[in-house]
Image (cartoon, rainbow, N blue to C red):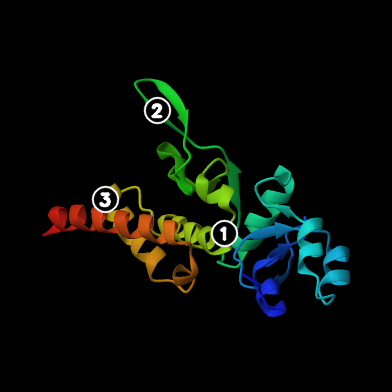
Amino acid sequence: VILSEVEQRNYVGAAFYYSPDGELLGHLGNSHEIRVVDSGIFYSLQYNNDDACLFGYSTSLYYSDNGTRVNIINSMARGLGLDYVYLDTLYYTVNDNRYISYDTGGKTTHMGTSGYGYQYSYITINNASDMFKGGNFYDMMCALIHEQDHYDNYNPQTYNKNYSEFFAFGATIHNQYFEYASQDFRESTYSQYRYYESLYYNLYY
């Protein structure tokens, strides 16, 4: 198969390019991958019709250092109005054994001291998840929107997991980024939405 120059530019080196400081430098081609590159290199090569060269100078989000990853995730989060998002490895426990979670995009954690009436809430993106390793811009934005719904609507007096997940997955589906998310992400989200939808209606109807 011989690709035209335009087709090559769409598939080779195409990405969302960020600086290590978290600045979105530009989006080239049709790929949805997040790549990290020095801003000087990006601006010197972006008009050279050589995306493959630019791609070669860049690094995937997953293989970037932790400071860079935190900067980029929080740049994306600020676009949604979120103040700060943590990046960490999330685990699950089975029979007191701790395992790394590879299939969880994020988590909203709520902590507080009831005696003082203080509630603290924060979001953590799982840097060991398959979603994070894939580095898809739209998958990441959808995961942030999902956690944002938990973050914005959490009430310790009325919290119910099934109710909360049903609406958070609904928010994930009905946002501007979801149609561009990867097929695996969309299928998983629809499956989870249907699961919590049935639990929600069994709970309230």
CA distance separating discs 1 and 2: 27 Å
Compared with residue 4, is residue 166 higher up or lower down, i.e. above or below? Answer: above
Residue located at (38% from left, 20% from top): 96
- Under tag 2, what secondary structure? strand
Estimate the x, y position of residue 184 in percent, counting from the top left. 43, 56
Residue located at (36% from left, 59% from top): 187
Q: Quadrant of the N terminus?
A: bottom right
Q: Quadrant of the C terminus?
A: bottom left
In primary-sequence order, the first of circles 3 and 1 is 1
* Any part of residue 28 in sight: no
For disc 2, the marked residue is 93
Compared with residue 92, is residue 163 higher up or lower down, i.e. above or below? Answer: below
Task: Specify the farthest residue to the front.
Answer: 1
In primary-sequence order, the first of circles 2 and 3 is 2
Residue 84 figure quarter: bottom right
Q: Tell whether 196 sits left or right of 78.
A: left
Estimate the x, y position of residue 192 in percent, counting from the top left. 31, 54
Q: Are marks 1 and 2 in contact (CB under 8 Å)?
A: no
For disc 1, the marked residue is 136
Residue located at (46% from left, 40% from top): 111
Q: What label sits on residue 162 in the rendered view?
A: 3
- Under tag 1, what secondary structure? loop
Amino acid type, label 3: Asn
- Under tag 3, what secondary structure? helix
Residue located at (20% from left, 56% from top): 200
